[in-house]
Amino acid sequence: MQLFIGNKNYSTWSLRAWYLMSKFNVVFDETQLVLDTPDFYSELQKHFTVHKVPALIDGDLKVSDSLAICEYINDAYLLGAAWPKNIVKRAQARSLSAEMHSGFMALRNEMPMNIRATRHLELSAAAKQDIARIDHIFATQQTVYPNAWLFGDFSITDAMYAPVVLRLKTYQISLSPLAEQYCEYVLSCPVLQGWVVQALTETDIVECDEAGVEV
């Protein structure tokens, strides 16, 4: 099984699939490509009709999109363990994952993931609204599962929100105490720390993701 990803410093969607697979000890070969380069597109064109990362090859199967990859891995390799067992909690977890997948556009556009940096930004009202919603999600789940993952055990939902936690750190965003508690829990995860360590060694620059003023 082969997982294609982009720069670990910048590629939020790559992190989501990689994090789930690594957290559950799924064995895969990693192919890392430098974003927005000729080699990036030429390599993906050899295998996929959609030239984006992450992208997965498992035998004859080819899957693009982080959430689709996570769902496939959950079904094929994890016996459903990447979602809560309880049907109500599972529906809630899927809802929050879908919200992350399709929403928070202001946050994404104004606060690109940049693990190496510590930056200051002047955020729009829309981005602040996104952050308030994120804060509410984290704090609400921490009242139910204190000092734990969003639904107690690690799930696809945590993989979907992990890049947001890293963004909040980069741009030094203040959160409520319970939301901060979740972020600290996520940042303490050894698997995520492994990704961060590798991101810090990268030297490639993607200019469009270098937002804000260095602190």
Image: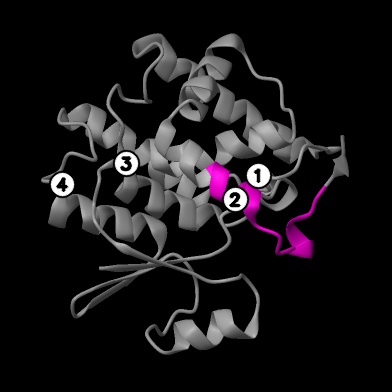
- Which of the numbered marks, if any, corresponds to residue 96? none
Are the residues flagged by discs 2 and 1 in contact, CB closer than 8 Å?
yes
Query: Disc 1 residue type?
Result: Ile
How much space separates mark 2 and mark 4, taking CA atoms? 27 Å
Q: Is residue 162 left or right of residue 129?
A: left
* Chain-order first, disc 4 or disc 3: 3
Residue visible at 53% across and 21% down?
184
Element type at mark 2: helix
The magenta stretch is 196-211
Residue visible at 57% across and 39% down?
164
- Crowdedness of circle 3 by 10 Å Cα count: few (<14), some, many (20+)? some
Residue 11 image point, x, y percent: 57, 57
Q: Label 2, on which residue?
A: 199
Q: Residue furthest front?
A: 201
- Which of the numbered marks, if any, corresponds to residue 78? 4
Residue visible at 30% across and 36% down?
155
Query: Disc 4 residue type?
Result: Leu
Residue 44 higher or lower than 111, as above or below? below
Magenta span has 208?
A: yes
How much space separates mark 2 and mark 3, taking CA atoms? 17 Å
Element type at mark 3: helix
Q: Label 1, on which residue?
A: 115
Q: Quadrant of residue 127?
A: top right
Element type at mark 1: loop
Residue 180 vs residue 85, the one in the foreground: 180
Magenta span has 104?
A: no
Query: Disc 2 residue type?
Result: Ala
How much space separates mark 2 and mark 1, taking CA atoms? 7 Å
